[in-house]
Amino acid sequence: MPFYQFGDMFFLKRIAREKWIPFIVGRFRSVGKDITEELAGMICDTVENYPAYVQQLAWNVLAMSGDSVTAASFHDGLESTMQQVTPLFVEQTEGLTSYQLNMLRAISQGYHNDFGKQEVTTRFNLGTRSNLVKLKKALIEREIVEENEQGLFIADPLFLLWFRRNMM
């Protein structure tokens, strides 16, 4: 593989849904397939406009569809995408402690801050307050969660979907 690691890596930011939809519709049309703006939007929304995932999911939806994309072919494309990413997500979760998994469960159910509240620590078995700092740090260092002004969030939209399906 002469070009492997040949150039610089570029980290792409999310691209706005409004830019993706006409691009996806146009690319599908260029190969003789129809996709509605609604279904193109579902591709974007499912993966929160992450460029690599939009392309991967769109490709799988394209591969699973006939002349026109349907809700069923969208679902089949999503399932194919999930099968492709599952080994990575299994690997990412294999080394996590039960407390770290519990914190991910809390985040995936909509708790993004206030982990120290008794109702949250008890419901999700997060351990002591001092343990919370270690959990947060470990999950951020592993790049599984990210922190912003609203709190902690699972960084990868497909990981979140996979986690909800397989680890709850």
Image (cartoon, rainbow, N blue to C red):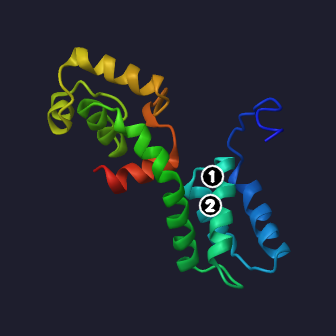
The residue pinned by badge 2 equals: 57
Disc 1 secondary structure class: helix
What residue is shown at x 20% (from left), y 37% (from top)?
A: 124
Residue at 30% from the left image edge and 37% from the top image edge: 101
Write down the residue under mark 1: 53
Q: Position of residue 74 (x, y in %)?
A: 57, 72
Q: Residue 75's spot in the image, x, y percent?
A: 52, 72
Furthest residue to the top? 130
Q: Which amino acid type corresponds to the residue marked 1 in the rendered image?
A: Tyr
Question: Which quadrant is the N terminus positioned in?
Answer: top right
Residue 163 shown left or right of residue 46 in the figure? left
Q: Nearer the viewer, residue 124 or 90?
A: 90
Which residue type carries mark 2? Leu
Q: Is residue 21 left or right of residue 123?
A: right
Q: 156 above or below 136?
A: below
Q: Please, which residue is most extreme toward the bottom here?
A: 67
- 57 to the left or right of 163: right
Give above or below for 95 relative to 164. Answer: above
Residue with the most extreme front position: 1
* Residue at 75% in and 32% down: 9
Do labels 2 and 1 touch, CB within 8 Å? yes
